């Protein structure tokens, strides 16, 4: 093994490791891209006679074989990279530390090299390639389709050998039938859902629901709350009968009650309690302090799964989110939590959702407070939903600009194939945005030209 005296040998080993990491990244991005490719776009390219699209279409029809081949390639690249680094570079590390009068055993050096390699392999061989693939799944999938098909042919005997060996070992161990409950990881379930979607067994709505379930415990309450500025609430300092018209018009069954200003919520008024009290003493004689209930406060950063569990346990239908200083920042209802999984729920009293209004075939007038996830679902967009800098459309635009625009800002804002224009602002925030989606034919023609130039 190199001991630091052969620079050329070390360079060759490092180049080999870089190459193997690239191979790992290539197949990791290919796997993510192929399972994320849009069927409608792929179908159109196939109909146009795009050879790469035809090859890719064949791959999507063999998901099990495709995924097995990818796993073989990724596993071999990872093993070879680790083996090369551990066995060949540990001596170099020992020699380098020796030059600065630090004694290190070969075993410790091997562990150190392995840890460093694992970090770079995870970042450059897994995370970065997959993020790139998610942003441009069709482009990455088409680029890699031919190579993967060739590898599938070459590795087919090896894949069959591994499958046969596994079955043989299980048979020898007497595990022809499963004797205990199988433990399936989240990633395995996700893979099965993706495979089922590719094969047409799980439709788009079902897949979206499953995805929402997995994302549920990763989100915080603040990301789905109704902001304090949009909350309908009443003041304890005014007679409740003064609010009757507003309460009827709002149509809510539970209403926050504040003292002084809305930052200081002190209770929750249940409309049925109000009606019951009014039937006994009349609306003008209702004592709001006597009938309002204790508010349920939670930190704004609480995870949705924990909030859902706690709200069920305490029989609360509305939670008041507070910041680190104790002030209210918004509310989350049980309905909000359920809608994160199943989508918007409307009853006969709900007003028609006007957060997205279609202006023409390409343009929409959108409420800037709409969550990115809802915008993606409604308009079939692919805006990043996991960015820490924003949760709503208004937040996305502010993140792009780097400042809060006012009513005088008239420039168009570009994001991928989307064009935003500020329509209305107020109270240091964006209220409404006009969104223009570039015509599909223009976008697809541009992408097709890129594909053909690959």
Image: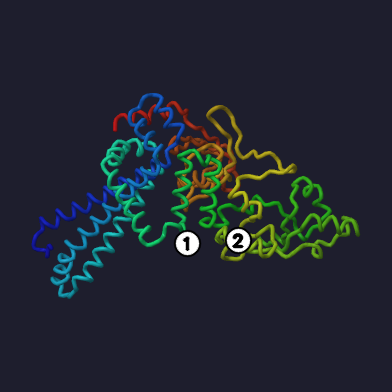
- Secondary structure under tag 2 reads helix
Query: Disc number at residue 276?
Result: none
Q: Which mark is residue 307?
A: 2
Q: Is residue 192 shown above or below 147?
A: below
Left or right: where does residue 373 sit relative to residue 150? right
Residue that extends furthest to the top in the rendered view of this protein: 48
Q: Nearer the viewer, residue 179 or 371?
A: 179
Of the numbered discs 2 and 1, the one sitting upstream in the chain is 1
Residue where numbered disc 1 is placed = 179
Mark 2 or 1: the one toward you: 1
Circle 2 Cα neighbour tier, 10 Å, few/some/many (<14 / 14–19 / ≥20) = many
**Quadrant (top left/top right/bottom left/bottom right) for the N terminus:** bottom left
In this rendering, position of residue 378 left or right of residue 274: left
The answer to whether one can see residue 185 in this image is: yes
- Where residue 410 sits: x, y (%)? 51, 35
User: Which residue corresponds to the image point at 36% horizontal and 54% vertical from the top-left?
Assistant: 167
Q: Position of residue 321 (x, y in %)?
A: 62, 60
The alpha-carbon separation of the residues under discs 2 and 1 comes to 36 Å
Q: Position of residue 242 (x, y in %)?
A: 82, 52
């Amino acid at each position: 093994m190199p001991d630091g005296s052969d620079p050329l040998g070390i360079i060759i080993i490092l180049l080999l490791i870089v190459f193997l990491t690239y191979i790992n990244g290539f197949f990791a991005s290919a796997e993510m891209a192929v399972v994320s490719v849009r069927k409608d776009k792929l179908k159109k390219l196939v109909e146009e006679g795009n050879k790469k699209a035809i090859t890719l279409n064949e791959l999507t029809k063999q998901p099990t074989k495709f995924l097995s081949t990818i796993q073989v390639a990724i596993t071999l690249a990872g093993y070879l990279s680790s083996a090369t680094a551990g066995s060949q570079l540990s001596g170099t590390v020992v020699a380098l530390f020796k030059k600065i009068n630090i004694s290190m055993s070969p075993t410790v050096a091997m562990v150190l090299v392995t840890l460093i390699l694992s970090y770079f392999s995870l970042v450059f061989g897994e995370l970065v390639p997959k993020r790139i693939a998610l942003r441009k799944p069709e482009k990455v999938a088409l680029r890699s389709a031919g190579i993967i098909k060739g590898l599938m042919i070459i590795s087919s005997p090896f894949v069959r050998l591994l499958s046969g060996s596994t079955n043989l070992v299980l048979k020898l161990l007497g595990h022809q039938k499963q004797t205990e409950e199988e433990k399936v990881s989240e990633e395995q379930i996700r893979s099965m859902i993706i495979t089922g979607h590719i094969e047409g067994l799980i439709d788009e709505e079902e897949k979206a629901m499953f995805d929402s379930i997995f994302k549920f415990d990763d989100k915080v309450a603040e990301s789905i709350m109704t902001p304090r500025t949009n909350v309908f609430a009443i003041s304890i300092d005014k007679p409740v009968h003064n609010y009757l018209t507003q309460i009827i018009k709002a149509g809510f069954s539970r209403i926050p009650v504040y003292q002084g200003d809305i930052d200081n919520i002190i209770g929750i008024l249940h409309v049925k309690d109000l009606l019951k009290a009014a039937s006994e003493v009349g609306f003008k004689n209702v004592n709001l302090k006597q009938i309002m209930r204790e508010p349920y406060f939670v930190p704004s950063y609480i995870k949705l799964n924990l909030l859902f569990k706690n709200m069920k346990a305490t029989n609360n239908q509305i939670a008041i989110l507070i910041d680190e200083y104790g002030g209210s920042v918004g509310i989350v209802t049980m309905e909000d939590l359920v809608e994160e999984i199943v989508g918007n729920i409307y009853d006969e009293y709900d007003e028609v959702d006007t957060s997205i209004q279609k202006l023409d075939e390409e343009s929409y007038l959108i409420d800037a407070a709409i969550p990115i996830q809802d915008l993606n679902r409604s308009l079939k967009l692919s805006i990043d939903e996991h960015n820490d800098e924003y949760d709503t459309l208004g937040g996305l635009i502010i993140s792009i600009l780097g400042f809060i625009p006012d009513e005088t800002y008239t420039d168009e804002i570009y994001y991928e194939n989307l064009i935003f224009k500020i329509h209305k602002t107020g109270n240091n925030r964006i209220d409404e945005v006009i969104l223009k989606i570039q015509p599909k034919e223009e976008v697809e023609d541009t992408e097709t030209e890129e594909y053909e130039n690959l």
